[in-house]
Image: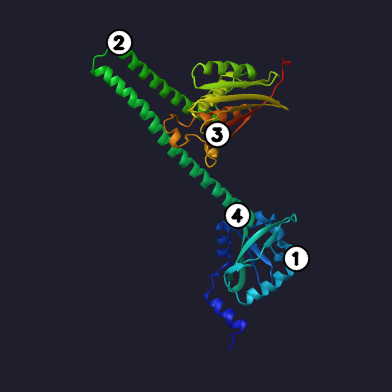
């Protein structure tokens, strides 16, 4: 024989939580969630402050009102039927599993919700407690948590890369310094040998100094502490000067300049821009071990100057091209293992470019070379040639 609704209710009532009204108020106060207490008629008996804030009401406006005021019109008839069924067999459960439910604020705006229902005896009278979760806020919290987890993972990767790079690069330089200084200390050498050893020590010391300088520069730029010494700069003249100087350092590479006939003037820090261009040209040389042409182009494009540097070297794999501007990233390939570097050059370049309100990106095909693009805001101040 099927159980009557009254039998089901008495069984449920025997096991459900029983509290007094003052205890209920204390419970609502300490709950971190939005909670609404209703009687069997669907009247709001009490809420906590989280529910008032969520729906935009004051206690005087909401207490004693039918729960329907918190529901969009289209849900009210179905809710009355659901409430009647619920109080005939009150159990703790989620409401509308698989359904898309909405609440309605005092100002009429709607928002998606999840609702958990719990029957409770307050001074031996059956009531229901609805715990309301703002799905939009919940999703935002989940996304924020995921973002923080991703950032933490990113920081852990940076830390691991930092330790690996610093360990390798610093140890390499220090080992060389220790070796040559040990030779000078323990053995007699000709003046020519002493000069060679001293030169090697000096070179490695400069390398260590440069690495420390790069570390400090990147830290300052990322924290916004680096200041630019702005002046008007003719970018064509700057490129010409730098390539003439670098051309003397390599016999296997040829620099080709294709410069816009309009002398592009940009407002920038000359030393920082020299650092950017020198780093990119040095990389073009380093990652083109077989030599070849390095092509530097400028073109005026609307309100911007577009600078590109193209080499015909080993290129960059598509899977890692997004990482090359990350600190301490070093292309790990058989063809590049002999190339020294801390992986700070391109991150510093990117920071400097962005400090000039510019943008940098790269195109590359493995085995065919890389093409770096830089876009700077243009300040035209001169005439054509």
Distance between mark 4 and mark 3 Cα atoms: 48 Å
Image coordinates of residue 94 in percent, x first then y, are 59, 67
Q: Nearer the viewer, residue 290 or 317?
A: 290
Q: Quadrant of residue 164?
A: top left
Q: In terms of sequence position, does the residue under pointer 1 or pointer 2 come before the other?
A: 1
Distance between mark 2 and mark 4 Cα atoms: 74 Å
Distance between mark 1 and mark 4 Cα atoms: 24 Å
In the image, which disc is placed on residue 368? Answer: 3
- Front tag of 1 and 3: 3
Distance between mark 2 and mark 3 Cα atoms: 46 Å
**Quadrant location of the C terminus?**
top right
Report whether 99 appears left or right of 336. Answer: right
Residue 60 appears anywhere in the view? yes
- Front tag of 2 and 3: 3
Image coordinates of residue 64 in percent, x first then y, are 70, 65
Q: In terms of sequence position, does the residue under pointer 1 or pointer 3 come before the other?
A: 1
- Front tag of 2 and 4: 2
Residue where numbered disc 1 is placed: 74
The local crowd at label 4, few if under 14, some if 14 to 19, many if 20 or more residues have their Cα within 10 Å, is few
Q: In terms of sequence position, does the residue under pointer 4 or pointer 3 come before the other?
A: 4
Which residue, as the protein is rendered here, is positioned at the far bottom?
Answer: 1
Residue where numbered disc 4 is placed: 138
Q: Secondary structure at mark 4?
A: helix
Q: In terms of sequence position, does the residue under pointer 1 or pointer 4 come before the other?
A: 1
Q: Nearer the viewer, residue 303 or 90?
A: 303
Q: State how the image is colored.
A: rainbow
Report whether 114 appears left or right of 161. Answer: right
Residue where numbered disc 2 is placed: 191
């Amino acid at each position: 024989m099927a159980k009557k609704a009254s039998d089901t209710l008495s069984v449920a009532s025997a096991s459900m939580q029983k509290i007094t009204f003052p205890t209920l108020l204390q419970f609502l106060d300490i709950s971190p969630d939005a909670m609404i207490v209703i009687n069997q008629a669907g009247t709001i008996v009490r809420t906590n402050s989280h529910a008032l804030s969520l729906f935009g009401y004051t206690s005087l406006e909401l207490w004693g009102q039918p729960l329907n005021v918190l529901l969009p019109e289209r849900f009210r008839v179905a809710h009355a039927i659901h409430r009647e069924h619920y109080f005939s067999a009150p159990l703790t459960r989620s409401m509308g599993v698989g359904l898309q439910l909405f609440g309605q604020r005092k100002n009429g705006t709607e928002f998606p919700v999840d609702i958990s229902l719990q029957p409770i005896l307050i001074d031996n009278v059956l009531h229901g407690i609805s715990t309301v979760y703002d799905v939009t806020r919940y999703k935002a919290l989940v996304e924020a948590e995921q973002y923080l987890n991703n950032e933490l993972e990113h920081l852990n990767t940076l830390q691991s890369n930092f330790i690996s790079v610093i360990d390798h690069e610093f140890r390499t330089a220090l080992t060389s310094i220790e070796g040559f200084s040990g030779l000078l200390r323990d053995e007699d050498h000709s003046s020519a040998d002493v000069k060679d050893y001293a030169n090697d020590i000096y070179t490695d010391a400069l390398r260590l100094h440069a690495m420390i300088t790069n570390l400090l520069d990147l830290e300052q730029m990322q924290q916004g502490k680096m200041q630019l010494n702005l002046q008007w700069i003719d970018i064509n003249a700057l490129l010409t000067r730098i390539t003439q100087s670098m051309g003397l350092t390599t016999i296997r590479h040829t620099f080709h300049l294709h410069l816009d006939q309009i002398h592009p003037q940009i407002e920038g820090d000359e030393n920082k821009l020299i650092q950017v261009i020198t780093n990119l040209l040095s990389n073009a040389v380093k990652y083109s071990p077989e030599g070849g042409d390095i092509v530097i182009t400028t073109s005026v494009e609307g309100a911007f100057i577009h600078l590109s540097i193209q080499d015909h070297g080993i290129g960059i794999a598509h899977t890692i091209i997004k990482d090359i501007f990350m600190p301490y990233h070093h292309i790990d390939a058989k063809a590049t293992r002999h190339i020294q570097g801390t992986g700070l050059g391109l991150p510093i370049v990117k920071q400097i470019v962005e400090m000039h309100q510019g943008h940098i990106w790269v195109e590359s095909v493995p085995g065919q070379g890389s093409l770096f693009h830089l876009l700077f805001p243009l300040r035209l101040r001169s005439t054509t040639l």
